[in-house]
Amino acid sequence: MKRRPPIKYSEAELTWVRENATRARRVLHSEFSRRFKRSDVTLGNLRKLCERNGWQTGRDGREAPIGSERMNKDGYVFRKVDGPESQPAHKNWKPVHVILWEAIHGEVPDGCALKCVDGDKKNTDPLNWVLISRSMLPRLCGCNGSIPFSSAPMELKQTILAVAELEQVSRASKKEMRG
């Protein structure tokens, strides 16, 4: 496969990018393209140029104030919590439903998870979350041919949870009997 020739930048373009490198890359790219009329330079090209030259945005992931909230790609709401400076920035974000649930019930035990009852992950009310064993998660996703918990009607959710718990207890007791 043939490589494309490297993109040539003028001295004025390089100076401008270096002076504006602390801007968010999307904004930098948009302004660069408009200012220099360079439709041939993609966002990825500009990111790589900055990376090669060591021009960083100056952002370290810690710029959001403590208490800020954001939503991840799966629809869970996260809140920025105080953490040690030595800790990676991404570890300073914790799911809001976990924070609220733990304030009432204490820490989520190892091997357990919180399952959203009404299917709305944005609903962080502790009453909307139930503590379950992680080993129950495959039973609730519909992997065994049953109705997936997340897409089941509200009136069936409690039944699906009860059946999954029963299967869990049954499996554990069979395991114990086998020794």
Image (spheres, grey):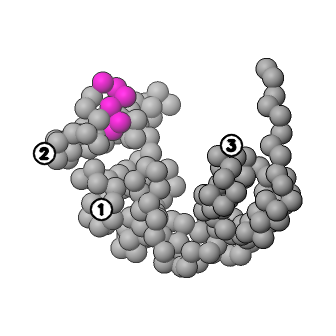
Mark 3 or mark 2, which is nearer to you? Answer: 3
Q: Which type of secondary structure does the marked residue at label 3 adopt?
A: loop
Which residue, given by chain and number where applicable, does mark 3 sit on? 40
Please state which of residues 85 and 41 is positioned toward the viewer in this rendering.
41
Q: Which type of secondary structure does the marked residue at label 1 adopt?
A: loop
Which residue, given by chain and number where applicable, does mark 2 sit on? 155
Q: Residue at x 52, y 55 (%)?
A: 110
Give the CA separation, mark 3 to mark 2: 56 Å
Residue 93 position by quadrant: bottom right
Which of disc 2 and disc 3 is earlier in sequence? 3
* Magenta segment main secondary structure: loop
Please state which of residues 124 and 40 is positioned toward the viewer in this rendering.
40
Image coordinates of residue 174 in percent, x first then y, are: 39, 30
Give the CA separation, mark 2 to mark 1: 18 Å
Give the residues in magenta.
140-145
Residue 13 position by quadrant: bottom right
